[in-house]
């Protein structure tokens, strides 16, 4: 009788009543972990629905390259819910020993193809590894000349975004910056992803809102809650940093997500897109008429601001965007730079096709 058993004997008996594992049960238990709900989720990404929308600026606030509005259809895709962080980029570099564009000297053989024939080779100091760093001015300046607040700094790279004496220690959760379009492409390939097309990016940024100015709707950026890491005050000399971040990156996810669950789709850092940049691409699509299906950008690039320098599209604005200057946190705002450029306010996020 059990009443005559010691506690140790009772425990031993109870243990015998626990079934032993079976191989088939073990396999079934592990199969159950890949149920349909979990397999429809990609970690760190949001599923963006397919849709048709009117791409471009819907008011008079756009720059000329944001017109004309034209109708675009995009297929469903996954998109990173945040910009790629320093920690994520570090994992890529650790796995591949990848060296970014900013860490390499500029190739004179490549550069001389883009300058007039006979241009003499510049000194090595100009070709040394370097990247573009924002340096605030001491007072008001003519805003047409960006060379007043952008400097090529030797030793600036993704690990040293503001120059050789800066670092990303403690900034693991900030977006990676000082990465070129080529670097972003390399990361995306390694991650089994790709860069978004410009059309995918704008559709995703609009977050299901129709024809509204910002990813959060129509409310002015300076009204109500802070909506993004941008610049408050007078550009480029007095950032009041009311949003908590003084002309630098913020950790990802500090502000509310848009309607599709995407964080920092406005502000923080510019995001490289896949497309070549042409100022007149929208006009070309509009002229074709109908709905442009999954446009992937023009086959070549032309920027009237710097003819002869091929460029890629950037979107979303950055911590340098200001209501009185570029206001590029507008969903339709376009920017461009050469694919070998690293900048202190430029990063990226990736997308993945829906299978
Ligand atoms: Ca800020």
Image (cartoon, grey):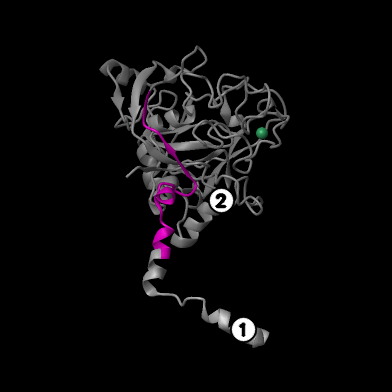
- Visible residue check, residue 118: no
Q: Position of residue 247 (x, y in %)?
A: 66, 36
Q: Position of residue 41 (x, y in %)?
A: 44, 47
Task: Give the quadrant of residue 344.
Answer: top right
| Ligand 1 visible in quadrant | top right
Mark 1: secondary structure:
helix
Q: Mark 2 — residue?
A: 86
Q: Mark 1 — residue?
A: 2
Mark 2 vs ligand 1: CB under 8 Å? no
Q: Position of residue 185 (x, y in %)?
A: 40, 46
Q: Is residue 103 located in the magenta-colored stretch of the structure?
A: no
Closer mark to the observer between disc 2 and disc 1: 1
Tell me which numbered mark, 2 or 1, is placed earlier along the sequence. 1
Mark 2: secondary structure:
helix
Range drawn in magenta: 29-52
Quarter of the figure that contains the C terminus: top left
Above-or-below relation of 262 to 321:
below
**Which residue is at a point 56% across and 83% down the rendered structure image?**
13
Residue 144 falls left or right of residue 112: right
Above-or-below relation of 28 to 13:
above
Residue closest to the far front: 1
Q: Is residue 39 located in the magenta-colored stretch of the structure?
A: yes
Quarter of the figure that contains the N terminus: bottom right
Q: Position of residue 168 (x, y in %)?
A: 62, 51
Observer-nearest residue: 281 or 219?
Answer: 219
Q: Residues within 10 Å of mark 1 (few under 14, many from 20)?
A: few
Task: Give the quadrant of residue 118.
Answer: top left
Q: Which mark is residue 25?
A: none
**Which residue is at a point 60% across and 49% down the rendered structure image?**
173
């Amino acid at each position: 009788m059990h009443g005559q058993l010691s506690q140790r004997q009772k425990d031993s008996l109870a243990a015998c009543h626990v079934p032993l594992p079976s191989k088939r049960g073990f396999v079934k238990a592990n199969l159950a972990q890949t149920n349909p709900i979990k397999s429809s989720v990609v970690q760190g990404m949001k599923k963006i629905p397919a849709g048709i929308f009117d791409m471009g600026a819907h008011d008079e606030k756009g720059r000329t390259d944001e017109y004309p509005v034209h109708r675009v259809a995009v297929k469903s895709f996954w998109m990173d819910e945040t910009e790629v962080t320093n920690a994520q980029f570090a994992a890529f570099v650790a796995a591949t020993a990848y060296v970014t564009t900013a860490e390499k000297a500029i190739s004179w053989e490549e550069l001389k193809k883009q300058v007039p024939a006979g241009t003499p080779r510049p000194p090595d100091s100009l070709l040394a590894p370097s990247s573009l760093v924002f340096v605030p001015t001491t007072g008001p300046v003519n805003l047409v000349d960006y060379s007043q607040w952008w400097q090529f700094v030797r030793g600036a790279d993704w690990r040293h975004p503001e120059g050789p004496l800066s670092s990303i220690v403690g900034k693991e959760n900030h977006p990676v910056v000082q990465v070129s379009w080529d670097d972003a492409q390399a990361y995306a390939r390694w991650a089994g992803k790709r860069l978004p097309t410009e059309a995918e990016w704008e559709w995703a940024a609009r977050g299901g809102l129709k024809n509204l100015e910002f990813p959060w709707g129509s409310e002015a950026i300076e009204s109500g809650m802070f909506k993004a890491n941008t610049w408050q005050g007078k550009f480029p000399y007095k950032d009041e940093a009311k949003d908590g971040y003084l002309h630098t990156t913020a950790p990802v996810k500090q502000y509310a997500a848009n309607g599709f669950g995407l964080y920092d789709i406005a502000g923080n850092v510019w995001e490289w897109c896949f497309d070549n940049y042409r100022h007149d691409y929208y006009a070309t699509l509009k002229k074709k008429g109908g709905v442009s299906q999954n446009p992937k950008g023009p086959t070549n690039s032309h920027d009237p601001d710097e003819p002869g320098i091929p460029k890629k599209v950037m979107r979303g604005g950055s911590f340098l965007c200001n209501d009185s200057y570029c206001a590029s946190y507008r969903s339709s705002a376009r920017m461009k730079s050469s694919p070998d450029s690293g900048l202190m306010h430029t990063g990226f996020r990736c997308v993945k096709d829906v299978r």
